[in-house]
Image (spheres, rainbow, N blue to C red):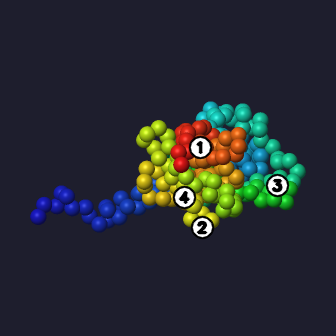
Amino acid sequence: MSCHRTVPKIVLLALLVACLPAVAATEDVAALIKRQSQEFSGASASGDAAVLDRYLDDRVTFMIEDGSVVTKRDILAGAGPSPKGISNHLVQADFHVQVYGPVAVTSFTDQSTVHAYGQVSHATYRSTEVWQKETSGWRMISSQTTAVPQDPPAATLPVKLLDEYAGVYKAGTDVTFVIARHGDELTGAVNGGKPYAIKAELRDVLFTPGQPRLRRLVQRDADGKVIGIITRRDGRDALVLKRTS
């Protein structure tokens, strides 16, 4: 048998050992990036400008949750402790990092807990960051954050008011939307499709659970009679339906 394709065990062992430092180094970088990223989130919540300055590259491309792109100078200028009576705490979850040599890419969820004058509110943000190894260490060169929308609390409305919403609504000849009442609950169906739950955020403002970006605004005439529904997505009117029955 030819032996030129057979690797002696001692050579194979040496090759495996030689690979170990590289693997360990990658794991160390991942742990370092995770730590720095959490420190950055904490500094963002507390307004610690020194930490933000240390981890941000001077040319960082940084998109915040409202879609605005800000500079490092903007971020540092807005840093500072919260007003008295207000505190914010950010904790990362679902953290993932991929290391590509001198570049690392992260994705994670920030869970925000805000205490304000004895009240507590929560919000969730989804972020991705890009870190680059520089002479001064690993620094963030890009970040993008989006707010994860949540369903609003559902309001309990009188059955008489729910009955006012029940009916058939049309947009042109192609879209028929039917609202029906079942006890103290509402359902909606489009073009004869499967009905789904509809909830009220407050009087004349309806939403579909699981679609927090969408609202349905009830239209009334001068006498208070329901005459239509405006479908609004992300603050913009998308479709107007007129009541036909």
Tell me what residue is drawn at x 55 percent, y 52 percent.
167
Q: Earlier in the sequence, mark 3 or mark 2?
A: 3
C-alpha span from label 4 to label 2: 10 Å
Q: What's the residue type where badge 3 is placed?
A: Ala
Return the residue at label 4. 180
Residue 65 in the image: x percent, y percent?
64, 43
Residue farthest along the left direction in this orientation:
1
Tell me what residue is drawn at x 42 percent, y 41 percent.
174
C-alpha span from label 1 to label 2: 22 Å
Dot label at residue 183? 2
Circle 1 crowding by C-alpha within 10 Å: few under 14, some 14–19, many from 20: many
Q: What's the residue type where badge 4 is placed?
A: Ala
C-alpha span from label 3 to label 2: 38 Å
Residue 131 in the image: x percent, y percent?
57, 44
Residue 118 in the image: x percent, y percent?
85, 60
Return the residue at label 1. 228
C-alpha span from label 4 to label 1: 15 Å
Q: Nearer the viewer, residue 29 or 105?
A: 105
Q: Nearer the viewer, residue 28 or 97?
A: 97
Asked if 127 appears above or below 163 in the picture, the reply is above
Residue 44 in the image: x percent, y percent?
72, 47
